[in-house]
Image: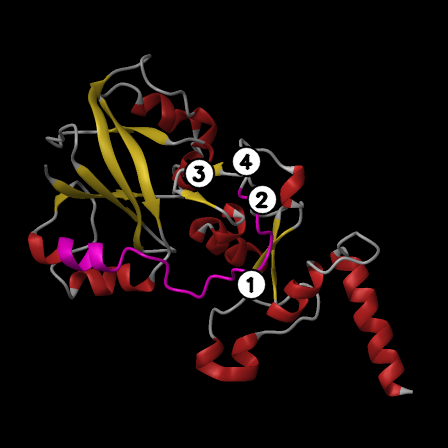
Amino acid sequence: MTVWIISANPKIYDHASSFEHHSFIDWGQGNGKFAVGDIIFIYTTRPASMIQYKCVVSATSLTYPNVRNDIAYWKDENDYYKSIKGKFMRLVIQDQVYNPKLSLSNLMANGLNAAPQGPVKVKHQLFEYINSNFSDDYQIEMFPDVLDEKTDHFEGVKKQILVNKYERSSIARQRCIEFHGLNCKVCKTNFVTIYGEMGAGFIHIHHLIPIHKIGKEYQVNYEKDLIPVCPNCHAMLHRKINGTEPTIDELKEIIKKSSARAQV
């Protein structure tokens, strides 16, 4: 078994959505001497500039049309048609994280020579560093949307879990923050303005569609389905009023009325 790093440019190919919607990607293998069972770490280029995915090679030397059609994830269809002329390896996702310790500067401080462009074989020191830090580097909120463990085992590409995988997905979380920002969508709180560096990057992520209304094959839309909220508002969004959880607008109205009463 060989361990590799390969790079992915989200400006060319939306690998995040592709992995989110499927359990594998048929990836152009180029001149790399990959073998079934090899471990592949995927380094996402700017703006992330860090390793975010761990995969295993399940097949090599696949050729079109015996590969998954993923034209929908290419920014330019011409690039897709160029890509299908070569050989492919099938990458089955094992895990995904968002951890600043796997950023380019930290990788280079622990054995990587330069930003990955072609396939890079991972030596022991670098593998130990990557493997020891392959976990999410932020506090995960455990209280929202706990599932009924008798009926609601979600089989995600990451692992089977008993809480809402969409709110806990590190990649979906980061893409939500990149799109919406770090201000609470209800009360406008931003933790870095209150707590300084200690609050940098801290926010909860709320799923707008109740977990019991979506199925196992649901494909999350990080722009429309996920929003950043502070812990207080997040807790209130999961409190039921007459058996129903409040909407974002309803919670805003409650805060507005409470603020008006306080000023009287």
Q: Which residues are magenta?
A: 127-149
Which residue corresponds to the image point at 35% horizontal and 30% vertical from the top-left? 24
Which is more foreground, mark 2 or mark 4?
A: 2
Identified by mark 3, the residue type is Gly
Q: Check contact, mark 3 vs mark 4: CB within 8 A.
A: no
For residue 204, which quarter of the picture?
bottom right
List the residue tagged with mark 3. Answer: 156
Residue 89 position, x and y percent, is: 23, 26
Image quadrant containing the N terminus = top left
* Magenta portion: prevailing SS class: loop
Q: Is residue 216 above or below residue 125?
A: above
Q: Report the disc number at residue 219.
A: 4
Q: Check contact, mark 2 vs mark 1: CB within 8 A.
A: no
Is 262 on the left-hand or right-hand side of 214? right
Residue 11 position, x and y percent, is: 40, 43
Identified by mark 1, the residue type is His
Q: Residues within 10 Å of mark 4 (few under 14, many from 20)?
A: some
Give the mark nearest the N terminus, 2 or 1.
Answer: 2
Q: Report the disc number at residue 204.
A: 1
Q: CA distance from mark 3 to mark 1?
A: 21 Å
Which is more foreground, mark 3 or mark 1?
A: 3
Q: Secondary structure at mark 3?
A: loop
Q: Report the disc number at residue 148.
A: 2
Q: Residues within 10 Å of mark 2 (few under 14, many from 20)?
A: few
Give the mark nearest the N terminus, 2 or 4.
Answer: 2
Which is more foreground, mark 3 or mark 2?
A: 2
Q: Is residue 196 above or below residue 84?
A: below
Q: CA distance from mark 2 to mark 4?
A: 20 Å
